Image (cartoon, rainbow, N blue to C red):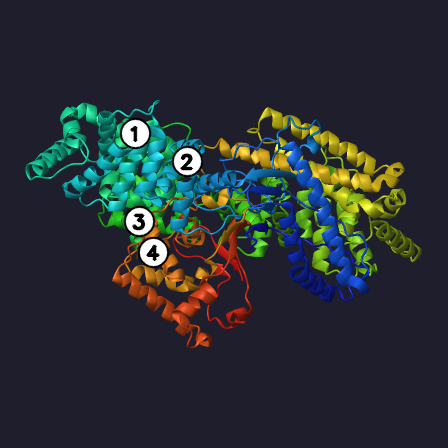
Amino acid sequence: MNQQRHIIKKQIIELNLSSQQGAFELQNEVSRLYRHKVLPLIDNLFNQFSDLDTIHRINTLEIDLGNIDINNLEQELIDKIIAQIQQQLEEQISLSNSSFSTPPQPNTELGKSSPLLRRTEGETGENLEVNKFTSVSATRYQRLSDQIGKSEIASKRALQLEVFSYFIQTGMLPWWAENLSKQELEQYCDRLITNSPNQVKSIVEQSLKNPKHLQRLIYQFSDSTLLKISGLFTGDSVQFIADYNTDIKSVLAQLEQTRNIPAAKLRLEIWQGLLLSFSSDSNNQIDKFKLVEENLLHIATSNRINYSEFLKNIVAKIEHLVRAGKEFKSTLPEILDRIQIPSQETQLIRAEARASQLEIFNDFIQTGILPENLSKQELEDYCDHLITNSPNQVKSIVQQSLKNTKQLQRLIFQFSDSTLLKIAGLFTGDLVPFIADYNTDIKPVLAQLEQTKNIPEAKLRLEIWQGILFSISSESNTQVDKFKLIQDNFLHIASSNNINYPELLTNLVAKIEHLVRAGKGFKSTLPEILDRIQIPNQDRQLIRAEARASQLEIFSDFIQTGILPENLSKQELEDYCDRLITNSPNQVKSLVQQSLKNPKHLQRLIYQFSDATLLKIAGLFTGDSVQFIADYNTDIKPVLEELEQTRNIPAAKLRLEIWQGILLSISSESKTKVDKLKLVQDNFLHIASSNRINYPDFINSIVAKIEHLVRARKGLKSTLPEILDRIQIPSQYTQLIKEREQLEHLLMELQHLDLNSQIFPQHKQQINQLKTEIEILRNAINNPAQAQRSSELITRFKQLQKSLETLKFNIQQELNYNQTRLPDTVNSFSDSDEIYIYNAGLILLWPFLTRFFVKIGLVQDKIFINTTSAERAALLLQYLVDNSTEIPEHSLPINKILCGIELLEPIDTNLEITEQEREECENLLSAVIQNWSILKNTSIEGFRRAFLQRNGIVRIRDGSWLLQVERETYDILLDRIPWSIRVVKLPWMDNILYVEW
C-alpha cells in the first residue's frame, strides 16, 4: 500500500488564447482535466522519485507547454505536462542529491512557513515538497542570481523538528504539516526526545528566552513529557523533580496563600520555575536546595505573596503533615530546613527584581492586560509607587501613550483623577494644584451647559483629561501657560463633540458670569482666564480645529484603510487634502510615495480624489510640468475613448490606469524636471500591459488616430503629436513588454529595501549587486540588436525575479530574528502570509457570540472580564465546532481572532466544561439552526460537520484580517442566511475580520 504523501500548495495554469471566445468553457475544461486526470499521474511520478524516508522540497517547478492543438486538447495537455514534469524532477532531484550530499541540519528557527516572515506561496510535502523558494548559502554560487537553490533534501526527523519548533514559537503548525490532535502532538514530541535529544534541548533552550514560548511548552505538554524534557538538562535528577512536583502541589493546594490560585496557573508557575532554574546550570548535576528555593521564590513573586511568610507557612504546613503521618516522595522537608528565610529588605529587592513593575505597567497601557488577581485598586497603588520611584520611565510610557488614541483612553479610564494629577505633575511641576482646581471647576459648568449637559459624564471626563494631557505634554518646559491650557482644552472638547467653538466659548462665559453673580466660588482663576480668551472668527476656528484634528494622520489612515471619521463628506475630504498639499507638502509627498508601493492604496488615492487634486499632488513631484500633465490628460482621454483597443474599457478603469502610469513614472524620477517623452511612453506601456494590449499595435493605433484628428483640425493642448513621432517601437517589445515593466517594479522594490537602516551590510551589497544586474538586463531588453536573444533575456529576468524574492525573504528573516518584542498580531503578518484552519465555519455564529459570552459570565460591559475569560471563550468556541475538550492550540487561530486574543499568545487548552456551559453551547447551536430557517430539521451534529468544520485560510488584506472559506456544493444555502457574514467585528476585537465564502 502506498503511504507516501505529497503536497502542492499552489498550482497556477496560464492559458494564452487568440480570442476571448470560448475562454470560460476552455478554462473549466482544463481545470477538470487537471484535477481528474493529470493530478493522479503527477502523484505516480512523485512516488517514483521519492521514498518514505526522504523529503524533497522543490521550490518552484515551472513548465512551458508551448502550443496545444485545441482539437486534441486532452491528449496533448496530459502528455506534455507529464513529460516536462518528469524531466524537471530528474534534473532537480539529481541536482539536490549532488549538492546536498551531507544532510543539512534542521532549521529550528522561524523560517519558510512562519507567519511572522514574508513566506512564499509555494508547495511542500512530506515525501516530495514543492515550495516557491528557499534560502541557500551565499557562498555556494558566485552570482547573486544563481544563489537560488531549486530543491533540497531533508529527513523526516529534520522536518518533525521543524514542526515542533514552529509550534513552540507560534502555537500553530506549518501549512504543510498534518493536523495533529493534542495526543498525537504529545507522541510527536516524545519520539523527538528519544531520537533527537540534542536538537530538542536546543529548541527548549530557545523557548526559555521567550515567556510566551515557555508558557506554550508547559500548557501544551503533560507532566510526563515535561519530565522527559527536564531529563535533557538534569540527567539523573529527573526522579527528584517528579517527586518534588508531586509533593509541592498537594502542599500548595492546602496553603492559605495559594489554595485559591487556579490549578493550571499554579502548574505553569511550578514548571516555569523548574525549567528556568535547571537550564541555567552549566552541568547536569542539579543543586536540589537551589532548585527548590528558586521555585518557591518564583511562585511567591508571580502571585505577589510575601516570600518570608510564604516560606514560614510552607514549613509549618509540612511539619503538620509529617506529624499527621504524611509521607513525602522527595526530600522536601529536609531541604526546607536549610532554606534561610530572608529579611524584609532582601525579600523586597528580590520581589521587585522579579515583578518587572514598569514592564507590567507598560504592557497594561498598551494591551489592557494585567497579571491575574491584580485588582483595580492594586493597579492604582502600583502606578502610584512607580510615579514616586521611577518618574522618568513613567513619563516616557505616558508620552508614548499620547500617540495612540486607545492607549490614552485606557490610561484615563483606568486611573483616578488623583493618579492622573500625579502623572500631570511629571510634565508640569508646580502647576498641579491649578489643574486640579480647573478640573473641579469646569465639570459642574459643563454639566449645566446646553451643548454639553447630555454628554455622558465618563466621556466628558475622558475629553477633559485628553485635552489637558495633550496640552501639557506638548510644552517644551514644565512651566505651563494656564491661558493656553484652558483654551486648548475647550477647543478639544468642542471639536470632539462637533460643537461650534465660538458658541461654546460664548455660552461658557455667560454661564460662569451667571454663576459668579449667584455667589458661586471658583477654586481656579477660570473666570479671569475666560475674560482673556478671544472668541475666534470662523476661519481661525477652522484652522485651530484642523491643527488639532491630526490632519495628516486622518489622510494617511484613509489612504491605507479607506476609513474616515464620521460626518466627513467626500467634498470635505477633497478640501482637506487641498489644504494639506498647501500647508504640509513634504508630508503629503511622503504619504503618496508610500501609497505607490501598494496597488490598493494607490487605487484609493486615484478613485477618491478629482483630477484637479491629483494634479496638485503631481506638482509635488514635477514642479513646472503640471501644465503638461494636465494637457496630456485632457488630450489622451478622448483619443483612447475612440480607439478600437480601449474604447470598451470603462471610463473609471481607464482614468485609474492613466493616473497610475503618470504617478508611477514621475515618482521614479530623481529630479523634478520630468522627461515628457519618457512619461508618455511609460504611460502608454502601463495602459497596454494592464489591458493585455499588444504595445506596438497600440502605439501605431494611437499615432494613426492622432494624425486623423490633426487632419480634422482637432486642437490638442499638449505636444502629444510631436512626442509620438519620437517614440521608437523596438521589435523585442512584442515579446518583452511584461518583463520591461516588471523590471521597473523590481528596481522600485530594491530602492525601498535599501532605505531600511536595520538590514545587514551583506544584504546592502546584495541589493547593489542586484540593481547592477537589473540595469544590465534593462539595457539589453531596450537594445534592438538583442531582439534575437529574447528567450535568453526572459530566462535571465526570471532568475533576477527569484533572486529578489529570496533576498527579501532573508532580510525579513534577519529582521524578525533580531526583534525582542513582537508587534500587534495583525501587523506581524504580510499580505502573502497564510494560516490554514479547519474550523472556518465558526464565523457563522458571530452575531450570537456576545450574548452567549454574557450568559456564561465571560463578558461584561462588552469586554471580557479578564484574560482567562477570553481564553476560556476561545476554547468554548472549539467545543461548539467539534464537541472537544482536549484541544491543541494550533486549532485556535480563528478562535483567538474572534476573542480578541493575539495570535501568538499561548493558551492553556485543557477545557473542563461546566454543565451550564455545555447547555448554553447546545442552546446557541439550536438557535442558529432555528433562525436559519432553511436548515429546518438539521441536527446539531449535522450542522457542525456541514458548516462549522470547514477548511479555510486566514490572511491579511489592507491591514485587516481576511478569512477565505472553502466552498462546498450545499453552500447555496448561505444565500438564505438571515444575517451578514461578510464583515465581522465584535466589541473586543481590535481588527475587522472580512470573510469571503
- Residue type at numbered disc 4: Thr
Quadrant of the image occupied by residue 399 = top left
- Residue type at numbered disc 3: Thr
Residue pointed to by mark 3: 868
Q: Position of residue 704 (x, y in %)?
A: 90, 54
Q: Earlier in the sequence, mark 1 or mark 4?
A: 1
| Residue 114, visible in the rendered structure | yes
Nearest to viewer (mark 2 / mark 4):
4
Q: Earlier in the sequence, mark 2 or mark 4?
A: 2
Relative side of 44 to 359, left or right: right
Quadrant including the N terminus: bottom right
Nearest to viewer (mark 1 / mark 2):
1
How busy is the neighbourhood of tag 3: few (under 14 within 10 Å), some, or many (20 plus)?
some
Q: Which numbered disc covers residue 885?
A: 4
**Real-space CA distance between mark 1 and mark 4, rounded to the nearest whole angstrom:** 35 Å
Establish if 963 lies above or below 779: below
How busy is the neighbourhood of tag 1: few (under 14 within 10 Å), some, or many (20 plus)?
some
Nearer the observer, 352 or 628: 352
SS class, disc 4: loop
Residue pointed to by mark 1: 236
**Real-space CA distance between mark 1 and mark 3, rounded to the nearest whole angstrom:** 37 Å
Nearest to viewer (mark 1 / mark 4):
1
Nearest to viewer (mark 1 / mark 3):
1
Nearer the observer, 216 or 441: 216
Whether label 2 touches label 4, CB < 8 Å = no
